[in-house]
């Protein structure tokens, strides 16, 4: 079955770095664009990055631009998010999600919690 | 960026009720509007894509309508498993913004 499993979350100090991974299975990973979407505790959803199927097109919102880098390894069926210069407001559950056609997402992974605190 | 709003922010309803949630975009997004359901401690799950297309495996009591700036998610007969938070998301232009959510709980 189609499955996404995130890893790499944890506690990090402000200004620190963390790399999240998302392992995909059950579908041809290289055929789909992917995104990272986050949810701060008790808050709504925020889309934080997009990468095309080949990796040639990438988007970020202003809130993370210049600090976060999305990448993928199609040979390893894996998606990554390198997060640098982390701030308290980056504290959230980070989900990876498979993109379909015109911008909807299914499925989503179970999420990995990133806590930025001193 | 396109701003998404939802109303109401929360509602209380009974099993069997018809429930309607509204989503509005700050500019026209054609039919690039998607709906997700999220239960506590779980990842969001796609219900409706492209404003009115039902995702495979989603019960037919869920339906979506609208185009341009105004959209609606309707649950025709609320079931116990439908108590959750619902989010709309525009996929017309990046960043693909979400609405703030509508929490549906038990009356």
Image: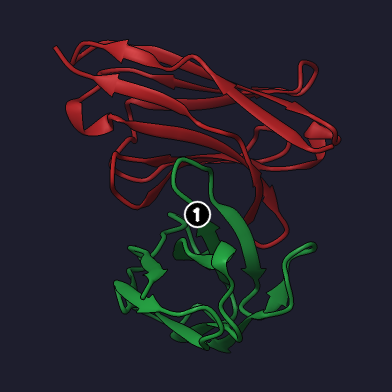
Chain colours: A red, B green
Q: Residue at x 64, y 26 (%)?
A: A5
Q: Residues within 10 Å of mark 1 (few under 14, many from 20)?
A: some
With respect to residue B40, does A29 lie above or below? above
Quadrant occupied by the N terminus of chain A = top right
Q: Chain of mark 1?
A: B
| Spot occupied by residue A62 in the image (x, y as percentages of width and height) | 30, 44
A43 with respect to B41 (left or right): left
The secondary element bearing badge 1 is classed as strand
Q: In the rendering, at what x and y percent does residue B96 appear?
A: 47, 57
Determine the residue positioned at 73% across, 71% down.
B59
Q: How many marks?
A: 1
- Quadrant in the rendering for residue B91: bottom right
Q: Is residue B66 above or below residue A39?
A: below
Which residue, given by chain and number where applicable, does mark 1 sit on? B38
Residue B105 lies left or right of residue A20; in this view the side is left
Point out the image quarter for the C terminus of chain A.
top left
For this orientation, the residue located farthest to the left is A118
Taking the image as drawn, is residue B91 in sight? no
Horizontal placement of A104 versus A94: left or right?
right
Can see residue B41?
Answer: yes
* Rendered location of residue A2, percent (x, y): 79, 38
Q: Residue at x 40, y 70 (%)?
A: B106
Q: Residue at x 56, y 40 (%)?
A: A35
**Residue A115 pos. (x, y %):** 29, 21
Residue A69, relative to residue B36: is it above or below? Answer: above
């Amino acid at each position: 079955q189609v499955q996404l499993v995130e890893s790499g979350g944890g506690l990090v100090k402000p200004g620190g770095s963390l790399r999240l991974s998302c392992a995909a299975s059950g579908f041809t990973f290289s055929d789909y664009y992917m995104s990272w979407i986050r949810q701060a505790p008790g808050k709504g959803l925020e889309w934080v990055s997009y990468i095309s199927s080949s990796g040639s097109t990438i988007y970020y919102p202003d809130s993370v631009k210049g600090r976060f880098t999305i990448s993928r390894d199609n040979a390893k069926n894996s998606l990554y998010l390198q997060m640098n210069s982390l701030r308290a407001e980056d504290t959230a559950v980070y989900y990876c999600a498979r993109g379909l056609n015109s911008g909807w997402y299914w499925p989503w992974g179970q999420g990995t919690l990133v806590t930025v605190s001193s | 960026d396109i701003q998404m709003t939802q109303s109401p922010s929360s509602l209380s309803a009974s099993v069997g009720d018809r429930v309607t949630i509204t989503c509005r975009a700050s500019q026209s997004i054609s039919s690039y509007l998607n709906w997700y359901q999220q239960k506590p401690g779980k990842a969001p799950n796609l219900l409706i894509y492209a404003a009115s297309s039902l995702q495979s495996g989603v019960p037919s009591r869920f339906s979506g309508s609208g185009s341009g700036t105004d959209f609606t998610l309707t649950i025709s007969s609320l079931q116990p498993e439908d108590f959750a938070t619902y989010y709309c998301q525009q996929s017309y232009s990046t960043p693909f913004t979400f609405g703030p959510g509508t929490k549906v709980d038990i009356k």
